[in-house]
Amino acid sequence: MSSSLRLERTPLSILNLASYPRGARPGDAFATTRRIAQHGERCGYHRFWLAEHHNLEGIASAATSVLIGNVAGATRRIRVGSGGIMLPNHAPLAIAEQFGTLESLYPGRIDLGLGRAPGGDFATMRALRAAGGSADDFPALIAELVDYLGPPHPHRRVRAIPGEGLEIPIWILGSSLYSAELAAELGRPYAFAAHFAPTHLLEALRLYRARFRPSAWFAAPHVMVAIPVVAAESDERAEYLATSLYQRFAGIVRGERGGTPPPVASLEKLWDPAVEATTRAMLKSLVVGGPQKIRRGLDATLEATGADELMISSELYDPNDTLRSYEIIARVAGRRIDDGEADPDFGRP
């Protein structure tokens, strides 16, 4: 299959953190998230996932299940889910009930992606995991969750109502060989977080495919790769918009967190060589450019990874630039754009 045809046939999805720029508030982020989801649906994206994060200025996706319900209620067709729920932060029964409720409200549209990271710093992890959950418990927590969502059992004393008996797709998320091996052992689809931690991408995918055990859920391995993409009308415009992303990641490297910064003409005075090297390593999978360069970058990603799906992270300083980026990506990938329901605010300054 040619690379161009492959891109046209590969499902594209959106990863959202409910981020907001400096000077804005979480409520602004939620309104923007709904707009992006609605626009993504019109642009033919397959899934819209929200990531769990805590205690991070500029990112408002802490109550992930609540946001999923808000987005699902504002859309009609696109699948909505978690990318992901950090399961050691939660009681499996609570997650089974939350996602059972979501699936009951929006049948056939809910995904449950699971990770084991805290989604925040160590102090936040301790606050979230006061009941004693840990990353080491991740496989057992998954097994407990799967049991709650399984068929009714006459001897089960504690039941997830709603949740029991619902066919909610469960994904394993990660950026390490551990997550790849676990997903393979469980026979679950695997989503790799190359949008911020691409170092072990190819090695993890090889391991997952080599060790995959067919299960009742999947007969063969299934991979989704999340990558950062900044698309604009020209390469120059895209490079300019991408400086917001570089600044945000440089802040992470320095231990500084805040809202998304505005783009700048030059990054030269904003980082030293060590911070620059680490930031560029974190964004190694980044694809930036106008339509032609975006097409080449997406084709190259599919060629290198053999991914069955691509998940795009493209959260920029100005929400209108974010919407335009997702639309350009969709057009480049041959998606049919529903122009009949255009966002009335799209393109406004």
Image: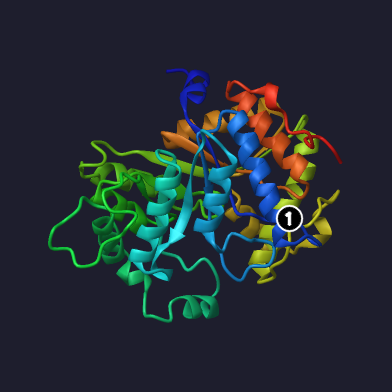
Of the pair 15 and 90, the residue shown nearer to us: 90
Give, as a three-letter code, the residue at label 1. Asp
Q: Which quadrant: the N terminus?
A: top left
In the picture provided, is 283 more to the left or to the right than 109?
A: right
**Number of residue marks:** 1
In the picture provided, is 339 more to the left or to the right than 158?
A: right
Mark 1: secondary structure: helix
Of the pair 283 and 128, the residue shown nearer to us: 128
Crowding at mark 1 (Cα within 10 Å: few <14, some 14-19, many 20+)? some
Q: Which quadrant: the C terminus?
A: top right
Which residue is rendered at x = 56% and y = 64% of the image? 62
Q: Provide residue 182's location: percent of width, then percent of height.
A: 29, 55
Which residue is rendered at x = 50% and y = 37% of the image? 310
308 vs 177: above or below = above
Residue named by callout 1? 28
Colour mapping used in the image: rainbow
**Residue 227 visible in the displayed image:** no
Q: Provide residue 279's location: percent of width, then percent of height.
A: 64, 57
The answer to which quarter of the image holds residue 299 is top right
Q: Provide residue 73's location: percent of width, then percent of height.
A: 56, 44
335 vs 309: above or below = above
In the picture provided, is 198 more to the left or to the right than 131?
A: right
In this view, the residue farthest toward the left is 155
124 vs 199: above or below = below
Of the pair 48 and 238, the residue shown nearer to us: 48
Of the pair 197 and 66, the residue shown nearer to us: 66
The answer to which quarter of the image holds residue 251 is bottom right
**Residue 174 visible in the displayed image:** yes
